[in-house]
Amino acid sequence: MGRPPCCDKEGIKKGPWTPEEDILLVSYIQQHGPGNWKAVPTNTGLSRCSKSCRLRWTNYLRPGIKRGNFTDQEEKMIIHLQALLGNRWAAIASYLPQRTDNDIKNYWNTHLKKKLKKMQTDVEGDSVRDGFSASHTLSRGQWERRLQTDIQMAKRALRDAVSPHNKPSGLFQSNISNTVSFSSTSAKPTQSLCYAATADNIARLLKEWKKNPPKKNPSRTISTVTQNSLGNLGACSKEAPSDEYNKGNSCETCETFESLFGLESLDSSNSELSQSLSPDPEPTTLFQDESKPECAAELPFSFLEKWLLDEVAFPGTS
DNA sequence: AAGATCCACAACCGCGGAAAC
DNA sequence: AGTTTCCGCGGTTGTGGATCT
């Protein structure tokens, strides 16, 4: 049963987005901000369902999205977070602010899953050769101990991945710079700038496209080009990654950790944070909603750090 | 060179939860 | 309190490009 799909209506366009549609959507959001997706198709004249608009925005058009190859660090993070959180891509994405859940999900399904499977096969092959099949011979107690060990290993590996002693990747530098910039108000102008650049870029691309329309599959080709360009531009907004995925995710993630490890409420760390991250009293910019919510940006990472570094919180981990 | 197959990823679908009525 | 509507999430599919045969 369930609700009928919102895209069943006649006249609703599906498939790849064209640059023109992108521009319509971006300029509308530029004026009104994201949210109220229901109204977007009506107000923009787009023949798209609200869902499609939201998806297009969150996955491609919003500023701060990094596209392209995943770094080793990101890969490690995804693997370990997936081990800890399962397929909760939105939660995982909240630790990789420049990546969308869709991106991470795709990367997991296309690359990491295979990689891990292969590794597992190799290990199991060895085990079978040794006359030992791990998964079938474990008693419940052994299984639990193994689970504990897995969690600890994941935890340790995650700590390695985020350790400041490691060469920091853009990922964590961006988190760090977020943290630093919280005390100043420098992030917002940067962010707006990048957004404007994004919209301008679409316009420029469209002009180019109209001058020299590609011979084959124009919409997809240009769309892809636009996406990449947007991604590249978005990458400049390291200081102000978008937060679409962080809304609500931080708490959700904290709950996950809490439930996983039986930690007490995060109230204390929250209050600490709320002090250090006093909300910006200035009038909001157009894309305030899109800006990295200080709390959401900071909380998961801080908590993660705390969790990783606090051996006491998880007795017997060392 | 051409067809077959694989791969990557953008987009869609359906569901659940929350908010609005 | 019950129903409807909207939003967000995760799983899945479709399509075009890349690679292989």
Image: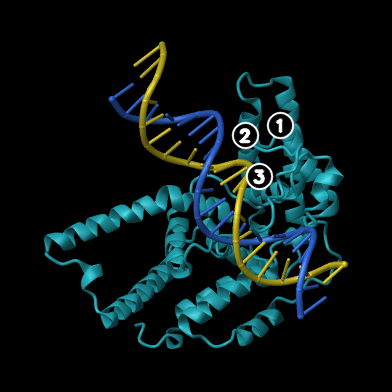
Chain colours: A cyan, B yellow, C blue
> Does dot 1 land on a helix, a strand or a loop?
helix
Counting labels gives 3
Q: In terms of sequence position, does the residue under pointer 1 or pointer 2 come before the other?
A: 1
The mark nearer the N terminus, 3 or 2, is 2
Residue A77 higher or lower than A30, as above or below: below
SS type, badge 2? helix
Spatial CA distance of label 1 from label 3 is: 13 Å
> How far apart are the alpha carbons under marks 3 and 2?
12 Å
Q: Could you tell me residue A207's position as x and y percent?
A: 76, 27
Q: Which chain letter matches label 2?
A: A
- Chain letter of disc 3? A
Marks 2 and 1: in contact by CB < 8 Å?
yes
Residue pointed to by mark 3: A233
Q: What type is the residue that disc 2 sits on?
A: Val
Taking depth in this image into account, of A178 and A92 the one nearest to the observer is: A92
Residue A79's x, y, as percent? 42, 61
Crowding near the residue tagged with mark 1, few <14, some 14–19, many ≥20 C-alpha atoms within 10 Å? some
Q: Chain of mark 1?
A: A
Mark 2 packing: few (<14 Cα in 10 Å), some, or many (20+)?
A: some
Image location of residue A313, percent across then percent down: 46, 86
Numbered circle sitting on residue A225: 2
Q: Is residue A291 visible?
A: yes
Dot 3: element: helix
Residue designated by label 1: A205
Residue A297 shown left or right of residue A40 in the figure: left
- Compared across the picture, whether A287 is left or right of A163 comes to right
The picture places residue A245, in percent across and down from the top left corner, at: 64, 61
